[in-house]
């Protein structure tokens, strides 16, 4: 028995329960062959968790316990803050309890299952539906289980292949999905977003990938369990753009540097030109996979060159760029990709030229832009413009003059995107962060994705970060309200 501010933990032979004082819901955690099962005493919730997902399990258990607790605070905002704080404090206590219970009960868990889930959790901070199914350990070959324990990319693939976003992460083909399920989920998505009149819209099976990708995460149909296991038997192919093996990829995966799971999931976006065993070089190669310009220069860069390039860019933009950060590498790639001249040299010189080019573009005068383009109106987004709130003032740059003025004031190259703004390929915004007084410019593409968000002189400040988050949420409504646009998507 253990207690914490009115909570009692009662141990059982195959699990335990957490019970609070009056008004708190009792939650039960039971041990199964390959997962925990969390359920409340009212039968309203039931959820599975991997054996090592202790933090996630504790947070959900705290939420269930407090869900029906009546708070005495009248103000709804204060009430929510109070509840969130209580959940946080309780989940910290439950984390320690669940870790203790795992140690107590792990002798009843199959050692192979425990080892596999530990490796997957270490690799991706999660477990995934496939590894939480006891059938996986009897269906999968011994070679697959051995690969998961030995190779981090195999563990990451096992973690994410059973998720609804597997199509975005891996090379999934038409034969992997039941297109009847895909069509059904898409029709539900259309009806929810646009109304019953879209129920009978024709479903083009040749465009199944575009249909599937526009459906929100929670409405997608994941890959069938059996197909997941089949694909994992040849897990290296999941990281190949066309699901064919090639030497550079195989050698990289078998000797994979310690990059994040998020970056590994982007490997299938392009082919590696060479085996890569260096972490920084692999990060750069993954980030530049979809580039049209300067891809060859970037893909052949060494660690020394990348470090020097980041140092030059850090000095030019005053951003805190680091070789440890994937976001810094991504920023470097995006900054270089803006530079449109042909270049055949090495990375360091390319960065220097890019810095000079950005400075020159920042000097573009409003009068010159109007003379070149005329003071034409920018294309209007297909959904209502975002409204400002108490934290952010959002202004759509609706004319050539407004975009050029933004470039002059912010001292960056937003004026080079005038053509895209006129054609509707980009929507450009100015952000004022009212609390700090900081400003930023944000580009959203025609599919609602935030392409870049930067402050003066390409500096990444609070306004840039908050503006990106705000417009990312707004942009999600573009495809939901205009699904026909997805067929022009390059993805």
Image (tube, grey):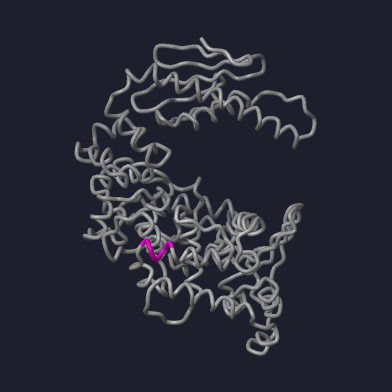
- Residue 111 lies in quadrant: top left
Q: Is residue 172 magenta?
A: no
Residue 384, image x, y percentages: 68, 63
Above or below residue 23? Residue 488 is below
Q: In front here: 98 or 130?
A: 98
Could you tell me residue 473's position as x and y percent?
61, 54
Q: Is residue 283 above or below residue 72?
A: below
Foreground residue, 133 or 288? Answer: 288
- Is residue 21 found left or right of 16 in the rendered image? right
Q: Is residue 361 visible?
A: yes
Q: For residue 423, say whether it is visible.
A: no
Q: Which residues are magenta?
A: 303-307
The answer to whether 6 is drawn above or below residue 297 in the figure is above
Place residue 26 in its image quadrant. top right
- Give the residue drawn at x 27%, y 45%: 232
Q: Is residue 54 left or right of residue 480?
A: left
Q: Main secondary structure of the magenta part?
A: helix
Residue at the far bottom in the pictured view:
371
Residue furthest to the right: 74
- Residue beneath the point at 49% across and 27% down: 46
Residue 451 position in % (x across, y down):
54, 64
Q: Residue at x 37, y 41 (%)?
A: 123
Q: Is residue 311 left or right of residue 256?
A: right
Task: Tell me if residue 123 comes above or below residue 102 in the rendering.
Answer: below
Residue 385, position in %: x, y? 69, 63
Please identify the quarter of the rendering in which residue 409 is found.
Answer: bottom right
């Amino acid at each position: 028995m253990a207690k914490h501010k009115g909570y009692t933990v009662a141990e059982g032979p195959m699990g335990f329960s957490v019970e609070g004082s009056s008004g708190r819901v009792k939650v039960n955690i039971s041990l199964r062959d390959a997962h925990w099962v969390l359920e409340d005493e009212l039968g309203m919730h039931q959820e599975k968790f991997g054996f090592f997902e202790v933090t996630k399990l504790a947070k959900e258990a705290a939420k269930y316990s407090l869900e029906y607790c009546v708070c005495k605070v009248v103000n709804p905002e204060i009430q929510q803050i109070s509840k969130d704080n209580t959940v946080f404090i309780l989940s910290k206590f439950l984390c320690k309890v669940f870790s203790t219970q795992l140690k107590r009960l792990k002798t009843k868990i199959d050692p192979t299952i425990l080892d596999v889930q530990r490796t997957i959790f270490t690799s991706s901070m999660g477990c995934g539906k496939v590894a939480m199914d006891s059938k996986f350990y009897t269906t999968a070959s011994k070679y697959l289980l051995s690969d998961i324990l030995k190779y981090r990319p195999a563990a990451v693939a096992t973690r994410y292949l059973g998720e609804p976003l597997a199509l975005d992460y891996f090379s999934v083909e038409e034969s992997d999905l039941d297109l009847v399920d895909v069509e059904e989920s898409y029709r539900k998505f259309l009806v929810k977003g646009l109304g019953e009149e879209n129920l009978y819209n024709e479903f083009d099976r040749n465009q199944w990938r575009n249909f599937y990708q526009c459906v929100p995460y929670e409405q997608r149909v994941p890959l069938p369990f059996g197909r997941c296991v089949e694909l994992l038997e040849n897990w290296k192919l999941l990281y190949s753009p066309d699901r064919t093996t090639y030497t550079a990829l195989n050698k990289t995966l078998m000797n994979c540097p310690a990059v994040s799971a998020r970056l590994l999931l982007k490997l299938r976006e392009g082919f590696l030109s060479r085996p890569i065993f260096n972490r920084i070089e692999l990060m750069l190669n993954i980030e530049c996979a979809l580039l049209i310009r300067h891809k060859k220069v970037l893909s052949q860069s060494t660690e020394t060159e990348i470090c020097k390039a980041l140092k030059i860019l850090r000095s030019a933009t005053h951003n805190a760029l680091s070789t440890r950060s994937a976001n810094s590498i991504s920023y470097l790639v995006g900054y270089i990709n803006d530079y449109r001249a042909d270049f055949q040299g090495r990375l360091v010189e390319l960065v220097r030229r890019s810095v000079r080019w950005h400075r020159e573009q920042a000097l573009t005068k409003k009068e010159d832009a109007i003379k070149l383009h005329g003071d034409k109106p920018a294309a209007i987004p297909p959904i209502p413009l975002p409204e400002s709130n108490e934290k952010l003032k959002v202004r759509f740059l609706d004319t050539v003059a407004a975009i050029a003025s933004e470039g002059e004031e912010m001292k960056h190259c937003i004026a080079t995107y005038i053509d895209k703004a006129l054609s509707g390929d980009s929507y450009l915004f100015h952000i004022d962060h009212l609390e700090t007084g900081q400003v930023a410019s944000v580009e959203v593409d025609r599919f609602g994705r935030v392409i870049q968000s930067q402050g003066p002189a390409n500096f990444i400040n609070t306004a840039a970060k908050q503006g990106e988050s705000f417009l990312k949420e707004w942009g999600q409504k573009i495809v939901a309200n205009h699904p026909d646009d997805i067929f022009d998507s390059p993805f």
